[in-house]
Image (cartoon, rainbow, N blue to C red):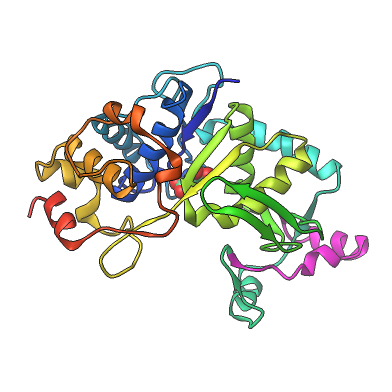
Amino acid sequence: MKKRGRFAPTPSGHLHLGNAWTALLSWWQIRSEGGEYVLRIEDIDKARSKPEYAAQLVEDLLWLGIDWDEGPDRGGPCAPYRQSEREERYDDALRRLLQDGWLYPCYCSRSELMKIASAPHGLGSEGPVYPGNCRRLSADEQAEKAAVKVPSMRFAMPDEPLGFVDLLAGRQETVAGSGGDFVVKRADGMFGYQLAVVLDDAAMGITDVLRGYDLLCSTPRQLWLYAALGLKPPQFAHVPLLCGPDGQRLSKRDKSLTLAAIREAGTGAEEVVGQLAWLGGLVERPERMTAREMIGAFDLAKVPSDPVAVSESLLRRLAGE
Ligand code: GLU
Protein backbone atom coordinates (compact mmCIF):
# COMPACT_ATOMS: atom_id res chain seq x y z
CA MET A 1 0.00 0.00 0.00
CA LYS A 2 1.27 3.46 -0.86
CA LYS A 3 2.15 5.56 2.18
CA ARG A 4 0.19 8.74 2.68
CA GLY A 5 1.21 11.42 5.12
CA ARG A 6 0.08 14.92 5.93
CA PHE A 7 0.95 18.20 7.50
CA ALA A 8 -2.08 19.61 9.27
CA PRO A 9 -1.33 23.07 10.64
CA THR A 10 -3.74 25.35 12.45
CA PRO A 11 -3.55 28.80 10.84
CA SER A 12 -3.67 30.73 14.10
CA GLY A 13 -0.21 32.24 13.78
CA HIS A 14 2.91 32.12 11.65
CA LEU A 15 4.74 28.82 11.26
CA HIS A 16 7.86 28.76 13.40
CA LEU A 17 11.03 26.71 13.51
CA GLY A 18 9.31 23.96 15.53
CA ASN A 19 6.62 23.58 12.87
CA ALA A 20 9.28 23.44 10.15
CA TRP A 21 10.93 20.61 12.08
CA THR A 22 7.78 18.44 12.27
CA ALA A 23 6.74 19.30 8.72
CA LEU A 24 10.14 18.33 7.30
CA LEU A 25 10.39 15.10 9.30
CA SER A 26 6.89 14.06 8.26
CA TRP A 27 7.54 14.95 4.61
CA TRP A 28 10.87 13.08 4.59
CA GLN A 29 9.22 10.05 6.19
CA ILE A 30 6.67 9.85 3.39
CA ARG A 31 8.78 10.95 0.44
CA SER A 32 11.61 8.56 1.40
CA GLU A 33 9.14 5.74 0.79
CA GLY A 34 7.74 7.19 -2.42
CA GLY A 35 4.47 8.10 -0.71
CA GLU A 36 1.94 10.85 -1.24
CA TYR A 37 1.71 13.99 0.84
CA VAL A 38 -1.32 16.03 1.81
CA LEU A 39 -1.61 19.55 3.19
CA ARG A 40 -4.71 20.06 5.33
CA ILE A 41 -5.61 23.34 6.94
CA GLU A 42 -7.08 22.79 10.41
CA ASP A 43 -9.13 25.95 10.65
CA ILE A 44 -11.97 24.50 12.63
CA ASP A 45 -11.56 27.15 15.30
CA LYS A 46 -12.83 30.06 13.28
CA ALA A 47 -12.19 32.63 15.96
CA ARG A 48 -8.47 31.81 16.07
CA SER A 49 -7.83 30.93 12.43
CA LYS A 50 -7.05 33.55 9.82
CA PRO A 51 -6.89 33.14 6.03
CA GLU A 52 -3.76 35.34 5.98
CA TYR A 53 -1.95 32.82 8.15
CA ALA A 54 -3.13 29.96 5.93
CA ALA A 55 -1.83 31.77 2.84
CA GLN A 56 1.47 32.57 4.55
CA LEU A 57 2.07 29.03 5.70
CA VAL A 58 1.70 27.72 2.15
CA GLU A 59 4.41 30.21 1.12
CA ASP A 60 6.62 29.20 4.04
CA LEU A 61 6.34 25.48 3.30
CA LEU A 62 7.12 25.97 -0.39
CA TRP A 63 10.09 28.14 0.59
CA LEU A 64 11.36 25.31 2.79
CA GLY A 65 11.12 22.97 -0.19
CA ILE A 66 8.14 20.91 0.95
CA ASP A 67 5.57 20.03 -1.68
CA TRP A 68 2.27 18.16 -1.58
CA ASP A 69 0.15 16.17 -3.99
CA GLU A 70 -3.15 17.31 -2.54
CA GLY A 71 -4.10 20.42 -0.64
CA PRO A 72 -6.36 23.45 -0.52
CA ASP A 73 -4.41 25.23 -3.25
CA ARG A 74 -4.38 22.32 -5.70
CA GLY A 75 -7.39 20.18 -4.82
CA GLY A 76 -7.39 16.40 -4.99
CA PRO A 77 -9.65 13.36 -4.61
CA CYS A 78 -10.30 13.99 -0.90
CA ALA A 79 -11.21 17.67 -1.20
CA PRO A 80 -12.00 19.92 0.53
CA TYR A 81 -8.70 20.25 2.40
CA ARG A 82 -9.86 22.94 4.81
CA GLN A 83 -11.62 21.71 7.92
CA SER A 84 -13.96 24.69 7.91
CA GLU A 85 -15.43 23.23 4.70
CA ARG A 86 -15.87 19.70 6.08
CA GLU A 87 -18.36 20.29 8.87
CA GLU A 88 -21.19 18.29 7.30
CA ARG A 89 -18.98 15.23 7.46
CA TYR A 90 -18.31 15.83 11.14
CA ASP A 91 -22.03 16.18 11.80
CA ASP A 92 -22.79 12.87 10.06
CA ALA A 93 -20.20 11.09 12.16
CA LEU A 94 -21.50 12.77 15.29
CA ARG A 95 -25.00 11.44 14.58
CA ARG A 96 -23.61 7.95 14.13
CA LEU A 97 -21.64 8.10 17.37
CA LEU A 98 -24.71 9.36 19.20
CA GLN A 99 -26.88 6.57 17.82
CA ASP A 100 -24.31 4.00 18.84
CA GLY A 101 -24.24 5.32 22.40
CA TRP A 102 -20.72 6.77 22.43
CA LEU A 103 -21.76 10.35 23.24
CA TYR A 104 -23.72 12.16 25.91
CA PRO A 105 -24.84 15.76 26.27
CA CYS A 106 -22.91 17.85 28.78
CA TYR A 107 -24.56 20.87 30.40
CA CYS A 108 -21.70 21.94 32.63
CA SER A 109 -21.14 25.67 32.53
CA ARG A 110 -17.79 27.31 31.99
CA SER A 111 -17.58 28.20 35.66
CA GLU A 112 -18.34 24.61 36.72
CA LEU A 113 -15.59 23.44 34.40
CA MET A 114 -13.23 26.06 35.85
CA LYS A 115 -13.86 24.62 39.30
CA ILE A 116 -12.97 21.19 37.95
CA ALA A 117 -9.79 22.67 36.52
CA SER A 118 -8.66 23.91 39.92
CA ALA A 119 -9.76 20.81 41.82
CA PRO A 120 -7.03 18.58 43.19
CA HIS A 121 -7.88 15.48 41.13
CA GLY A 122 -5.66 17.07 38.75
CA LEU A 123 -4.66 18.15 35.37
CA GLY A 124 -4.12 15.49 32.78
CA SER A 125 -1.64 16.38 30.10
CA GLU A 126 -4.67 17.07 27.92
CA GLY A 127 -6.12 19.55 30.37
CA PRO A 128 -8.31 18.89 33.38
CA VAL A 129 -9.93 15.48 33.51
CA TYR A 130 -13.72 15.80 33.30
CA PRO A 131 -15.13 13.86 36.23
CA GLY A 132 -18.18 12.68 34.30
CA ASN A 133 -20.94 14.71 36.08
CA CYS A 134 -23.24 14.76 33.05
CA ARG A 135 -22.50 11.16 32.13
CA ARG A 136 -24.44 10.14 35.22
CA LEU A 137 -27.57 12.23 34.56
CA SER A 138 -30.86 10.33 34.43
CA ALA A 139 -33.13 10.79 31.41
CA ASP A 140 -35.36 13.10 33.49
CA GLU A 141 -32.44 15.23 34.62
CA GLN A 142 -31.24 15.47 31.03
CA ALA A 143 -34.65 16.58 29.81
CA GLU A 144 -34.85 19.22 32.53
CA LYS A 145 -31.47 20.67 31.59
CA ALA A 146 -32.12 20.41 27.85
CA ALA A 147 -35.15 22.67 28.27
CA VAL A 148 -32.92 25.59 29.27
CA LYS A 149 -29.53 24.97 27.73
CA VAL A 150 -27.83 23.80 24.54
CA PRO A 151 -25.35 21.11 25.58
CA SER A 152 -21.90 20.26 24.32
CA MET A 153 -21.42 16.63 23.28
CA ARG A 154 -18.88 14.47 25.06
CA PHE A 155 -17.34 11.18 24.08
CA ALA A 156 -17.62 8.61 26.86
CA MET A 157 -14.17 7.07 27.20
CA PRO A 158 -14.50 3.31 27.73
CA ASP A 159 -13.42 1.91 31.02
CA GLU A 160 -10.64 -0.16 29.48
CA PRO A 161 -6.92 0.45 29.10
CA LEU A 162 -5.55 0.88 25.62
CA GLY A 163 -2.05 0.22 24.41
CA PHE A 164 -0.37 1.18 21.18
CA VAL A 165 3.08 1.33 19.68
CA ASP A 166 4.45 4.70 18.64
CA LEU A 167 7.29 4.51 16.14
CA LEU A 168 9.39 6.93 18.17
CA ALA A 169 7.98 7.07 21.67
CA GLY A 170 7.70 3.27 21.80
CA ARG A 171 5.05 1.13 23.49
CA GLN A 172 2.42 3.21 25.29
CA GLU A 173 0.21 1.70 27.96
CA THR A 174 -2.58 4.02 28.89
CA VAL A 175 -4.93 3.65 31.81
CA ALA A 176 -8.66 3.11 31.47
CA GLY A 177 -10.53 6.31 30.61
CA SER A 178 -7.23 8.03 29.89
CA GLY A 179 -7.66 11.81 29.87
CA GLY A 180 -11.37 11.60 30.69
CA ASP A 181 -14.46 12.17 28.55
CA PHE A 182 -13.80 14.87 25.97
CA VAL A 183 -15.88 17.32 24.00
CA VAL A 184 -16.49 16.43 20.34
CA LYS A 185 -18.83 19.35 19.68
CA ARG A 186 -19.08 22.49 21.77
CA ALA A 187 -22.38 24.10 22.70
CA ASP A 188 -21.57 26.93 20.27
CA GLY A 189 -21.34 24.42 17.42
CA MET A 190 -17.57 24.17 17.11
CA PHE A 191 -16.31 20.65 16.53
CA GLY A 192 -13.47 19.33 18.64
CA TYR A 193 -9.97 18.79 17.25
CA GLN A 194 -10.00 15.07 18.15
CA LEU A 195 -13.09 14.27 16.11
CA ALA A 196 -12.12 16.35 13.10
CA VAL A 197 -8.54 15.06 12.91
CA VAL A 198 -9.63 11.42 13.12
CA LEU A 199 -12.35 11.77 10.50
CA ASP A 200 -10.09 13.66 8.12
CA ASP A 201 -7.07 11.40 8.47
CA ALA A 202 -9.34 8.41 7.80
CA ALA A 203 -11.20 10.05 4.90
CA MET A 204 -7.91 11.13 3.34
CA GLY A 205 -6.41 7.64 3.61
CA ILE A 206 -3.52 8.81 5.79
CA THR A 207 -1.34 5.81 6.67
CA ASP A 208 1.32 7.61 8.73
CA VAL A 209 0.91 10.48 11.15
CA LEU A 210 4.17 12.06 12.25
CA ARG A 211 3.61 15.03 14.55
CA GLY A 212 4.91 16.72 17.69
CA TYR A 213 5.27 14.93 21.02
CA ASP A 214 2.73 17.29 22.58
CA LEU A 215 0.01 15.35 20.76
CA LEU A 216 1.03 11.91 22.09
CA CYS A 217 -1.44 12.36 24.95
CA SER A 218 -4.28 12.93 22.45
CA THR A 219 -3.62 9.63 20.74
CA PRO A 220 -5.60 7.33 23.11
CA ARG A 221 -8.67 9.51 22.61
CA GLN A 222 -8.19 9.41 18.88
CA LEU A 223 -7.70 5.64 18.88
CA TRP A 224 -11.00 5.21 20.75
CA LEU A 225 -12.68 7.40 18.16
CA TYR A 226 -11.26 5.23 15.37
CA ALA A 227 -12.61 2.16 17.16
CA ALA A 228 -16.03 3.71 17.78
CA LEU A 229 -16.32 4.75 14.14
CA GLY A 230 -15.05 1.43 12.80
CA LEU A 231 -12.10 3.12 11.10
CA LYS A 232 -8.53 1.91 10.75
CA PRO A 233 -6.04 4.12 12.60
CA PRO A 234 -2.77 5.25 11.00
CA GLN A 235 0.68 4.43 12.34
CA PHE A 236 1.77 7.18 14.73
CA ALA A 237 5.23 8.67 15.29
CA HIS A 238 5.53 11.52 17.80
CA VAL A 239 8.74 13.44 17.38
CA PRO A 240 10.42 15.37 20.20
CA LEU A 241 9.76 19.08 20.43
CA LEU A 242 12.47 21.62 19.76
CA CYS A 243 13.34 23.60 22.83
CA GLY A 244 15.41 26.72 23.43
CA PRO A 245 18.62 26.89 25.50
CA ASP A 246 16.40 27.42 28.57
CA GLY A 247 14.77 24.04 28.03
CA GLN A 248 11.41 25.64 27.18
CA ARG A 249 9.64 24.54 24.04
CA LEU A 250 9.95 26.97 21.13
CA SER A 251 6.60 28.60 20.71
CA LYS A 252 4.53 30.66 18.37
CA ARG A 253 5.06 33.59 20.70
CA ASP A 254 8.75 33.80 19.91
CA LYS A 255 8.44 36.09 16.91
CA SER A 256 12.08 35.92 15.85
CA LEU A 257 11.68 32.20 15.16
CA THR A 258 8.81 32.38 12.71
CA LEU A 259 9.79 31.22 9.26
CA ALA A 260 8.66 34.61 7.96
CA ALA A 261 11.12 36.39 10.29
CA ILE A 262 13.91 33.94 9.50
CA ARG A 263 13.39 34.56 5.78
CA GLU A 264 13.28 38.28 6.27
CA ALA A 265 16.53 38.13 8.21
CA GLY A 266 18.12 36.81 5.02
CA THR A 267 18.65 33.22 6.19
CA GLY A 268 18.29 30.75 3.34
CA ALA A 269 15.97 27.74 3.36
CA GLU A 270 18.97 25.46 2.81
CA GLU A 271 20.53 26.70 6.03
CA VAL A 272 17.34 25.98 7.99
CA VAL A 273 16.92 22.54 6.39
CA GLY A 274 20.56 21.58 7.03
CA GLN A 275 20.40 22.63 10.68
CA LEU A 276 17.13 20.77 11.26
CA ALA A 277 18.43 17.62 9.53
CA TRP A 278 21.48 17.78 11.79
CA LEU A 279 19.37 18.29 14.94
CA GLY A 280 17.36 15.27 13.78
CA GLY A 281 20.50 13.13 13.74
CA LEU A 282 20.15 12.59 10.00
CA VAL A 283 23.46 14.11 8.89
CA GLU A 284 26.93 14.31 10.44
CA ARG A 285 27.37 18.03 10.02
CA PRO A 286 24.96 20.96 9.73
CA GLU A 287 25.62 21.69 6.08
CA ARG A 288 23.31 23.58 3.78
CA MET A 289 21.03 21.33 1.77
CA THR A 290 17.66 21.31 0.12
CA ALA A 291 14.75 19.41 1.61
CA ARG A 292 14.74 17.18 -1.46
CA GLU A 293 18.43 16.26 -1.04
CA MET A 294 17.64 14.80 2.38
CA ILE A 295 14.93 12.41 1.20
CA GLY A 296 17.32 9.55 0.51
CA ALA A 297 19.11 9.99 3.86
CA PHE A 298 16.01 9.91 6.03
CA ASP A 299 15.89 7.23 8.72
CA LEU A 300 13.36 7.60 11.52
CA ALA A 301 15.49 5.34 13.74
CA LYS A 302 18.15 8.10 13.84
CA VAL A 303 15.74 10.77 15.09
CA PRO A 304 16.22 11.29 18.85
CA SER A 305 13.28 10.57 21.13
CA ASP A 306 14.17 13.16 23.82
CA PRO A 307 13.56 16.92 23.49
CA VAL A 308 16.04 18.52 21.11
CA ALA A 309 17.77 21.69 22.31
CA VAL A 310 18.55 24.46 19.86
CA SER A 311 21.62 26.44 20.94
CA GLU A 312 21.61 30.16 21.53
CA SER A 313 24.13 30.67 18.75
CA LEU A 314 22.00 28.81 16.23
CA LEU A 315 18.90 30.77 17.22
CA ARG A 316 20.85 34.00 16.75
CA ARG A 317 22.22 32.89 13.43
CA LEU A 318 18.81 31.97 12.05
CA ALA A 319 17.46 35.31 13.24
CA GLY A 320 20.23 37.02 11.26
CA GLU A 321 21.94 38.46 14.36
N1 GLU B 1 -3.65 21.02 13.80
C1 GLU B 1 -2.80 20.54 14.83
C2 GLU B 1 -1.80 21.61 15.21
O1 GLU B 1 -1.60 22.56 14.50
C3 GLU B 1 -2.01 19.30 14.42
C4 GLU B 1 -2.88 18.13 14.31
C5 GLU B 1 -2.15 16.82 14.14
O2 GLU B 1 -1.05 16.78 13.60
O3 GLU B 1 -2.74 15.81 14.52
O4 GLU B 1 -1.19 21.52 16.23
Q: Nearer the viewer, residue 37 or 8?
A: 37
Q: Nearer the viewer, residue 47 or 95?
A: 95
Q: Position of residue 35 (x, y in %)?
A: 48, 22
Q: Residue at x 76, y 42 (%)?
A: 227
Q: Residue at x 28, y 70 (%)?
A: 246
Horizontal side of residue 30 vs 182, given as left or right: left
Q: Which of 125 and 80 is in front in this view?
A: 125
Compared to residue 152, the image places residue 93 above or below, namely: above
Q: Position of residue 141 (x, y in %)?
A: 88, 66
**Is residue 318 at least partly visible in the picture?**
yes
Decide whether residue 235 is among the magenta residues. no
Compared to residue 46, the image places residue 63 above or below, namely: above
Horizontal side of residue 318 vs 88, given as left or right: left
Q: Where is residue 170 in the image (x, y as percent from the top left)?
A: 57, 52
Q: Where is residue 63 in the image (x, y as percent from the top left)?
A: 24, 31
Report the quarter where the N terminus lies: top right
Locate residue 217: give its quadrant: bottom right
Horizontal side of residue 158 vs 65, given as left or right: right
**Is residue 184 at least partly visible in the picture?**
no
Decide whether residue 134 is among the magenta residues. yes
State which region is magenta. 127-152
Locate residue 21: give its quadrant: top left
Numbered circles on residues, count:
0
Report the quarter where the C terminus lies: bottom left
